[in-house]
Amino acid sequence: QARLEESGGGLVQAGGSLRLSCVVSGITFSTKTMAWYRQAPGEQRKLVARISHRDSTDYEDSAKGRFTISRDDAKNTVYLQMNSLKPEDTAVYYCNVLRGYYNNAPAVANWGQGTQVTVSS
């Protein structure tokens, strides 16, 4: 059974940086497209960035130029480097496996606990 474990969140001032990590177990990680989602209070969870098994990447518009998704298949880990953070980036961040590179639907039903990112102005 797949398991997702996010970490690396915290409280940061606007303009600061954070690096999130997600360790994945129970799947053949190296063959999967991975994604980061975020959910702000009162809003639906939405996809922020994705990375294919061949390291192709794509970002939601607000993340372009500021966030970088990467992966380490030897560690079964996907990362999200977030720079130039803004208060509107405040959310709980989650990772998941995508059903396909162009399919936003998460493949793992049991989400991890997420990691809280809070950006102060």
Image (spheres, rainbow, N blue to C red):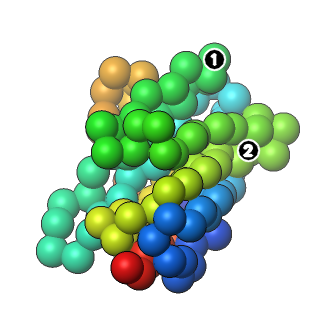
Residue 1 vertical placement versus 5 (above, below): above
Asked if the residue at tag 2 contacts the one at tag 1, i.e. Cβ–Cβ closer than 8 Å, the answer is: no
State the quadrant of the C terminus: bottom left
Q: Nearer the viewer, residue 40 or 61?
A: 61
Disc assigned to residue 39: none
SS class, disc 2: loop
| Residue at left offset 63%, top offset 17% | 54
Q: In the rendered image, which residue does mark 2 sit on?
A: 76
Residue located at (64% from left, 69% from top)? 8
Q: Is residue 105 left or right of residue 20?
A: left
Q: Which residue is mark 1?
A: 54
Residue 100: x and y, percent? 40, 24
Q: Amino acid at mark 1?
A: Arg
Percent position of residue 1, x then y: 57, 52
Q: Nearer the viewer, residue 102 or 66?
A: 66
Quick one: 76 or 87, which is closer to the camera? Answer: 87
